[in-house]
Image (tube, grey):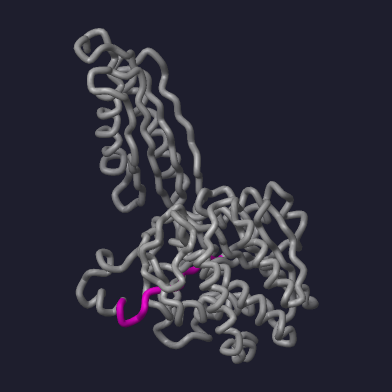
Amino acid sequence: MAADGLLDTIDRQLDWQRDLYRHFHQHPELSLNEHRTAERIEAELGGLGLESLRIGGTGVVTVLDNGPGPTVLARADIDALPVTEDTGLDYASTVDGVMHACGHDMHLVALLGAVRLLSEHREAWSGTYVALFQPAEENAAGAQAMLDDGLTARVPRPDVALAQHVMPAEAGTIGTAPGPVLSAGDSLRITVHGRGAHGSMPHTSVDPVVLAASIVLRLQTIVSREIQPGQFAVVTVGASNAGTKSNIIPDRAELLLNLRTYDPAVRAQVIAAIERIVRGECAAAGAPREPEFEYYDQFPLTSNVAGAHQTVTEAFTDHFASGQVFEAVPATASEDFSRIPDAFGIPYVYWFVGSVAPETFRAAVEAGTVSSVIPANHSPFFAPALDPTLEIATRAHVVAACAYLRP
């Protein structure tokens, strides 16, 4: 296939990519504040003789027009997390309290590497390649910010969109799956109202602390008693906040929830159940006001279209060695990438790239300690093995693109 010859030269640029990765890892920036990151991406693209567009504030896009053929959009997220790094790396974050704890630095450097290869070997492919560097994935704002800034009108309409994510699997491997690969995610702030009173006079109150506790317990029955066994749903109460002093019964309480689902119908069922339970418990407690529901940080479902998934997976299987490509189990994490292809009305493929040193991962598998000893994304200890992860992630972008951009 076209990618094979093109990738013969990847060794010549890996040192450049490694240096770039160390730079981005040392200088992380939070969502919608990726100013230096965007400037460095633009500088690297300019060094390759490519023009770039700023879309969505700190989003960067470059378009490689290379004759007739399909248009492929490849996306990498670029933001970091408010996490204090504890990896001990000699290129650890230099920004207090901010870290690339999810691997987005790996994503953006792999995409830059793919852009360089495709730019320097235009004889190996034909069509249009749109490389999109998206801000603010972590708070689900970046894809929408680019769309609100006219993305769909400012770049050629793609035929397919591609994205990937490093995960705590064996480095050198790639995981793909048709259908859902990442869950839909919703955060929800619930405010319930009581009637405040002195702690010594509870009979004059409607206690929102007790009300909130009743709600938390009842919410646990949604997945266990209302969702059909075998269907996936998670309802997490991440915070319960009320009151300021031991002898004051407050007048309100706040609950913060997080929901994860793979099926839109199940999502609707869970949301309806939450609101029904909260309203019912408030009525039972004699709450003086209706509860308030605020939905935020909402992530769409990421679900690979079967035909596009098959095209990319076959290309991976043809290019990589036996055993490197595996069928992934859907992850319960969430992403906002699918907002972009959904806005264009096109199929997309999203895959996982292993990032744990093979000897470390295999030892953990043998010991049955994968989940307990291997840091997951968002951990202060998360540190992808630079090699071979960076090369595999770069190869994956090129191979997936060339499955469509045949000369």
Q: Nearer the viewer, residue 29 or 254?
A: 29
Instruction: Name which residue lies at 31% across and 76% down.
Output: 361
Q: Residue furthest top?
A: 204
Q: Picture coordinates of residue 391 (x, y %)?
A: 51, 81
Q: Residue furthest right?
A: 67
Q: Is residue 4 visible?
A: no
Query: Is 178 placed above or below 316 here?
Result: above
- Left or right: where 20 falls relative to 272: right
Query: Is 287 placed above or below 388 here?
Result: above
Q: Picture coordinates of residue 303 (x, y %)?
A: 50, 59
Q: Nearer the viewer, residue 225 or 132?
A: 132
**Which region is colored magenta?**
349-360
Query: Is 131 placed above or below 121 here?
Result: above
Q: Nearer the viewer, residue 15 or 302?
A: 15
| Residue 108 inside the magenta-drawn segment | no
Residue 35 in which image quadrant: bottom right
Instruction: Name which residue lies at 33% across and 23% down.
Output: 280
Instruction: Name which residue lies at 44% across and 50% down.
Output: 263
- Left or right: where 206 falls relative to 60: left
Specify the principal SS of the magenta part: strand
Instruction: Name which residue lies at 35% across and 51% down.
Output: 231
Q: Is residue 67 visible?
A: yes
- Left or right: where 79 falls relative to 116: left
